[in-house]
Image (spheres, rainbow, N blue to C red):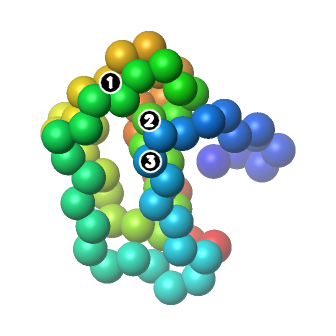
Amino acid sequence: MQPGRRLGASTITIFRAVVPIKSTTVSANTISNVHFGIWAKNAPPISAASNHFKGLAVPVEASAGP
C-alpha cells in the first residue's frame, strides 16, 4: 500500500500486526459495493478467483510485513 493512501471500506479484513498469519482460506464469497473487497496484511495470498466481486475499486489488496 502506498504511504499516505487512504483506506476505503472493506468487506473482509485479514490483519496481523507483527507475526505473519501462516494459513487462512477466503472463498465462496460474494462481495459488492465497497472500495476493497478483501484487504489483507501479513497474510498468505488470497485468491480473487475463488470469490465473486461486483462494483469494487479493488477486489483484493494485500501487503506483507509490518
Residue in the image at 52% along x and 34% along y:
36
Q: Position of residue 15 (x, y in %)?
A: 52, 66
Residue in the image at 82% along x and 44% along y:
4
Q: Position of residue 57 (x, y in %)?
A: 52, 21
In the displayed structure image, the side of residue 6 where residue 33 appears, left or right: left
State how far apart marks 1 and 2 are (Cα): 7 Å
Q: Residues within 10 Å of mark 3 (few under 14, many from 20)?
A: some
Answer with mark 1 or mark 2, whichever residue precedes in sequence. Answer: 2
* Nearer-the-camera pick, 44 or 36: 36
What amino acid type should be assigned to the residue bearing mark 3?
Answer: Ile
Answer with mark 3 or mark 2, whichever residue precedes in sequence. Answer: 3
Q: Position of residue 26 (x, y in %)?
A: 26, 52
Quadrant of image for the C terminus = bottom right
Q: Can you identify the residue that label 1 sits on?
A: 53
* Residue farthest toward the right in the current orientation of the protein: 4
* Residue farthest toward the bottom in the current orientation of the protein: 19
Answer with mark 1 or mark 3, whichever residue precedes in sequence. Answer: 3
* Nearer-the-camera pick, 2 or 17: 17
In contact (CB < 8 Å): disc 1 and disc 2:
yes
State how far apart marks 3 and 2 are (Cα): 6 Å
Label disc, if present, on residue 37 of the rendered structure: 2
Q: Residues within 10 Å of mark 2 (few under 14, many from 20)?
A: many
State how far apart marks 1 and 3 are (Cα): 12 Å
Count all numbered tags in the image, as a single digit: 3
Q: Residues within 10 Å of mark 1 (few under 14, many from 20)?
A: many
Q: Can you identify the residue that label 3 sits on?
A: 12
Q: Position of residue 22 (x, y in %)?
A: 31, 79
Asked whether residue 64 appears in the rendered view, the answer is: no
Residue in the image at 76% along x and 38% along y:
6
